[in-house]
Image: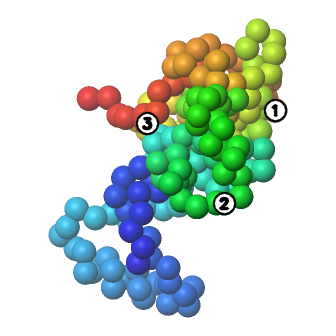
Amino acid sequence: MVRNDYAGLPTAEFIIPADAAEKTIAAITSAVSGLSVEHLTNETIDVFRIEAGIPASARDIDDEVVPPETGQIERGISYHKGCYLGQEVIERMRSHNILARKLVGLRPDGADALSPGSLIKRDDKEIGRITSTCWSEALGAPLALGYVKTIHAKPDTPVMIEGESGQRTGKVVSLPVRAKG
């Protein structure tokens, strides 16, 4: 068992051999019966993760992303540790307070899902790309994570999202997203 807050809330992850999964899940479910504990599917965890603004490795963090752009500095970067690969670039970004892009939440108009890889535009210029998408129960609408140029990262900034199904308007939203009420 590994405790983590990957989904934006306290969670525990169990690493189980596939042939023991069914029996182990039944034993864990029995042990926590009556407690405020829920078994979450990967899809549900992904929704919580996106609503919390937590990037997923490989999907939201690839070779084009510099760690400070993810907004996860406190969780994964040490400015006090000894030398590591990329330290000079990261320190320069910190000391000059300059980021080329930022990970943001994006709320498209309408109810249709977005596609990862869709371009984000403003004034007919490409300003970023979408990396993860979901249907947000907190918003009652589609939600995406994506990287945009820092100048366009302010909440409520209007954007145009261009994907496989055409163009649609949307806006940058504050993260984490929380249910109303």
Counting from the top left corner in percent of width and height, residue 20 is at 50, 90
Q: Earlier in the sequence, mark 1 or mark 3?
A: 1
> Which quadrant holds residue 69?
top right
Structural crowding at the residue carrying mark 3, measured as other residues with C-alpha within 10 Å and reported as few (<14), some (14–19) or many (≥20): some
**Of the pair 91 and 141, the residue shown nearer to us:** 91
Specify the quadrant that holds the C terminus. top left
Structural crowding at the residue carrying mark 2, measured as other residues with C-alpha within 10 Å and reported as few (<14), some (14–19) or many (≥20): few
Residue type at mark 3 is: Pro
Q: How far is disc 2 from disc 1 in space, using C-alphas?
A: 40 Å
Residue type at mark 2 is: Tyr
Q: What numbered label is drawn on residue 43? A: none
Q: What numbered label is drawn on residue 164? A: 1
**Of the pair 140 and 172, the residue shown nearer to us:** 172
Q: Earlier in the sequence, mark 2 or mark 1?
A: 2
- Which residue is pictured at 74% across the width and 33% down the height? 129
Counting from the top left corner in percent of width and height, residue 14 is at 44, 76
Q: Is 60 displayed left or right of 78 in the figure?
A: right
Q: What numbered label is drawn on residue 176? A: 3
- Which residue is pictured at 34% across the width and 58% down the height? 10
Q: Is 46 displayed left or right of 122 in the figure?
A: left
Residue type at mark 1 is: Glu
Element under label 3?
Answer: loop
Counting from the top left corner in percent of width and height, residue 136 is at 49, 38
Element under label 2?
Answer: loop
- Which residue is pictured at 25% across the width and 81% down the height? 31
